[in-house]
Amino acid sequence: MKYYKSYGIAFLVPILLIVGIFYGMLIWDFAAAFTSWQGLQPTWEFVGFSNFSRLFELERFWINVRNNLLWLVFFIVPTALGGFVLAYFLSNLGRAENVFWKIFLFPMALSFVVTGTLWAWMYDPSSGVINTILGGIGINTSRLGWIADPKIAVYCMILSAFWQYLGFSLVLYLGAIKGLPSEMIEAAKVDGASRFKILFRIIFPNIAHATLICTTMLAITTLKVFDLVWIMTRGGPGVSTEVLPYLMYRLTFESRDFGMGAATSIVMLIFSAAIVIPYSLWMLGKWVRA
């Protein structure tokens, strides 16, 4: 079949249009961040960095940044590490592996809306299943407010996301481990290496590609988490569980301050790029050198 360059261009046009629209919206958002746009009627009066300075003066903005950082640390590390360890043990179970990985992966079929509703009910201080079980075995639950407690609410939400994404991490690492040459692991066993050393000295360094994919995807998930916050706490108690995407929503659609909402989205973009791009380049460098 003779190939014509025009055919390739014809197939690329729809994708290029979609990408073009995306970047056009990004430019439009960037422009709106430097205007005084408030209310439903667009106003394109240039105000410089005024929206950014107003945003940085908000105490709740720094609470949001702190919460996003907490998500990055306490969601990514346990989820990736837990998936890796589980994948190693499941890879040694034989046929039983096919049952267990499906059980762990099932929560990924749920949306954050369903997960948030389920865990909000479980965390309910008065009638939730967690306090009901703890009370049934004699533990005083009067002080266990879970998502009603501003000190631990964000960690409770992270736990629910960990439950949902553990299977994602598990499947990625399981596929990577199964792709390793069996001779490598058998040679280590012959040399007397313990399971712990095989796991962290041999297997882990040789599946850097899985770690890169897993941690990057988890980071992107944390940086755009919105629906879980909306369903479980509405950012409360107070603003203790708010994250930057939720703040952007409230500024834009509740306060009708589109300029500050756009400024928040630009900060989110810079924040995300500052974390994901250097990390990805570092991991790719390690992967290539390995």
Image: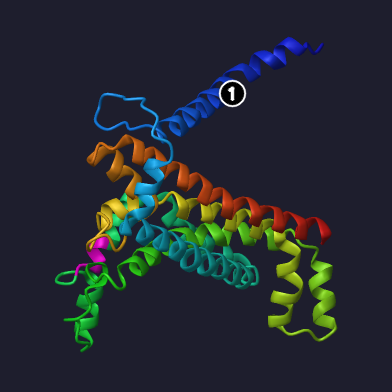
Q: Secondary structure at mark 1?
A: helix
Residue 123 lies in what quarter of the image? bottom left
Q: Residues within 10 Å of mark 1 (few under 14, many from 20)?
A: few
- Colour scheme used in the picture? rainbow
Q: Position of residue 125 (x, y in %)?
A: 18, 72
**Residue kind at label 1, given as amino acid type:** Ile
Relative to 175, say whether 83 is above or below.
Answer: below
- The front one of 2 and 263 is 263
Q: Position of residue 62 (x, y in %)?
A: 38, 60
Relative to 202, say whether 164 is above or below.
Answer: above
- The front one of 80 and 286 is 286
Left or right, 167 with reference to 183 = left
Left or right, 14 with reference to 37 = right
Q: Position of residue 14 (x, y in %)?
A: 57, 19
Residue for badge 1: 15
Residue 62 seen from this side: yes
Examine the residues drawn in magenta and state their main secondary structure.
helix
Residue 133 lies in what quarter of the image? bottom left
Q: Residue at x 35, y 54 (%)?
A: 57
Query: What's the magenta region?
Result: 120-124
Q: How many marks?
A: 1
Left or right, 189 with reference to 108 = right
Q: Residue at x 85, y 84 (%)?
A: 191
Position of the N terminus by quadrant? top right
Left or right, 73 with reference to 144 = right
